[in-house]
Image (cartoon, grey):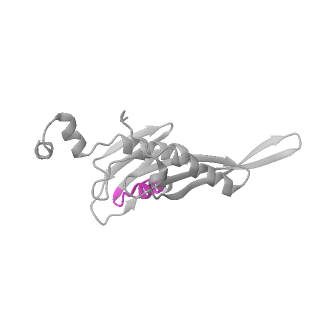
């Protein structure tokens, strides 16, 4: 995974939020069942900044609000090249394995629900993605962000190698 992850302050940018999943969980006590809700929320600015969070509360709206606040604390920048990803990549988190491929202009976001929310929030408009293994939304979102963070664009590779951008493309 990329060691130079850059954290972003949420107060400086306009963020959109997408609710990925809401789960009703029950705690069995002596007096009966106590219900609460957990919500996974993805936020992003549509231009390469994305984050996710988990909120838990007795009410759905409170859980979503807590999830949004948690996501704003974990914003990261991911590379976006002309509305798609830089290269093919795959990542694993827990039982979830995700495969991400760049796509041509006009393809759209071809991905499942949890992955789709991450791509749309990050501003990736053309991508082919497949979720293998576990379909647990927690792990799928984490694996997708892990895959996006481990990607490097051509500018980063050129800077790291100390060569020009043309040499990266031409070999």
Q: In the image, residue 21 lies at what x, y percent? A: 59, 53
Q: Say whether residue 125 is magenta.
A: yes
Magenta span:
115-127
Q: Is residue 32 left or right of residue 13?
A: right
Residue 70, compared with residue 104, is above or below; it is: above
Q: Is residue 155 left or right of residue 84?
A: left
Is residue 142 in sight in this rendering? Answer: yes
Q: Quadrant of the image for the N terminus?
A: top left
Judging depth in this view, the residue of 39 and 10 nearest the camera is 10
Q: Is residue 54 left or right of residue 94?
A: right
Q: Name the residue: 42% across, 41% down.
A: 146
Judging depth in this view, the residue of 132 and 169 nearest the camera is 169
Q: Name the residue: 52% across, 42% down.
A: 139
Q: Main secondary structure of the magenta part?
A: helix
Q: Name the residue: 27% across, 58% down.
A: 82
Farthest residue toward the bottom? Answer: 106
Q: Quadrant of the image for the C terminus?
A: top left
Q: How many marks?
A: 0
Q: In the image, residue 97 lies at what x, y percent? A: 44, 42
- Residue 104: quarter of image: bottom left
Q: Is residue 169 left or right of residue 38?
A: left
Farthest residue toward the top? Answer: 3
Q: In the image, residue 161 lies at what x, y percent? A: 18, 34
Farthest residue toward the front? Answer: 12
């Amino acid at each position: 995974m990329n060691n130079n992850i850059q954290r972003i302050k949420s107060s400086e940018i306009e963020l959109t939020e997408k609710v990925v999943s809401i789960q009703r969980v029950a705690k069995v006590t002596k007096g009966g069942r106590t219900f609460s809700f957990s919500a996974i929320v993805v936020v992003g600015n549509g231009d390469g900044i994305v984050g996710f969070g988990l909120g838990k509360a007795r009410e759905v709206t409170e859980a979503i609000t807590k999830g949004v606040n948690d996501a704003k604390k974990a914003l990261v920048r991911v590379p976006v090249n002309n509305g798609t990803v830089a290269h093919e990549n795959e990542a694993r988190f827990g039982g979830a394995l995700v495969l991400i491929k760049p796509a041509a202009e006009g393809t759209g976001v071809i991905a499942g629900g949890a992955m789709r929310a991450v791509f749309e929030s990050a501003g990736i408009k053309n991508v082919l993605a497949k979720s293998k293994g576990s379909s647990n939304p927690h792990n799928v979102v984490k694996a997708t962000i892990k895959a996006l963070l481990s990607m490097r664009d051509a500018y980063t590779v050129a800077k790291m190698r100390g060569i020009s951008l043309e040499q990266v493309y031409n070999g």
